[in-house]
Image (spheres, grey):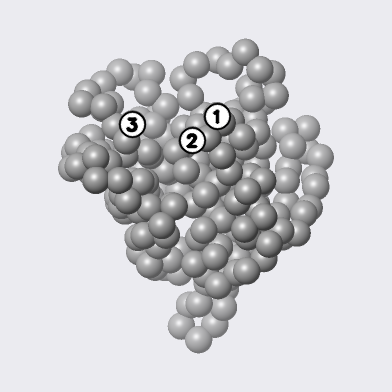
Amino acid sequence: MKEFAVVGRPNSGKTLFTLNFAAYLGCRTVDMTFRAPDGLLDCRHFVLAEARRELCGPVSHKTRAVQSLVLKVRVGKTDVNFKLTDTCGVSEQIHDDEAIRRGMAQTLSLIRGSDFIVHIIDLTQVADALPSGEADIDREIYQYGVTRDRYILLANKTDLPAARANIPRLTAAFQQASVLPISALESQGFAEVKAYVADNV
């Protein structure tokens, strides 16, 4: 079963995308497996609305460990299972909270071990100089991803007019990537994401 790792900065929309993409594929409930950095597993069953309330929010690093769903996508006349794994947000800074540092390390390990990288960037945070320095975590994820040829970049928050204006800037900065504009909140652009998954499971 192929694994798609959803990665990006804190508050880029990774968890909301994961849950709303499950809803887009027809799920009303989800069984989520939480894997702590020390390897401890916990499985929980959620109604999707409950999962959104509990797992999503404006606080940075709400997600501190990997959390996976097994979903199905139709390929021809067959339903194929795949794993969609949400992760702790990563950044250039060394966080002062040990639990978050361990969560970031777990994310970086998953990037190396997963079959596909689904990189989410918050379009509202795209700066004029993006990306300029070598110490840019989005640039590092991108550079690693395109060398593996199993990488897609999701430009999130297209439901906001100011964010949509940043799409050309983002595509110019990440020229080797397949960039799909999405809104994790409104489930916009999910047909294209589904097609990408179906082509690669």
Q: Is residue 45 left or right of residue 153?
A: right
Q: Which mark is residue 11?
A: 2
Q: Nearer the viewer, residue 9 or 82?
A: 9
Q: Dot 2: what SS? A: loop
Residue kind at label 1, given as amino acid type: Ser
Q: Dot 3: what SS? A: helix
Q: Position of residue 150 (x, y in %)?
A: 42, 51
Residue 103: quadrant of the picture: top right
* Residues tagged 1 and 2 counted as in contact (Cβ below 8 A): yes
Q: Is residue 61 above or below residue 167?
A: above
Dot 3 corresponds to which residue?
Answer: 125
Residue kind at label 3, given as amino acid type: Gln
Residue kind at label 2, given as amino acid type: Asn
Question: Callout 2: few (<14), some (14-19), or many (20+) C-alpha neighbours within 10 Å?
Answer: many
Q: Is residue 28 above or below residue 14?
A: below
Name the residue: 73% across, 42% down: 35
Name the residue: 60% across, 65% down: 71
**How far apart are labels 3 and 1 at the CA level?**
14 Å
**How far apart are labels 1 and 2 at the CA level?**
6 Å
View extreme (bottom): residue: 77
Q: Is residue 156 left or right of residue 59?
A: left
Q: Dot 1: what SS? A: loop
Dot 1 corresponds to which residue?
Answer: 60
Residue 171 visible? The answer is no
Q: How many marks?
A: 3
Q: Position of residue 92 (x, y in %)?
A: 46, 20
Question: Can you say which quadrant of the picture contains the N terminus?
Answer: bottom right
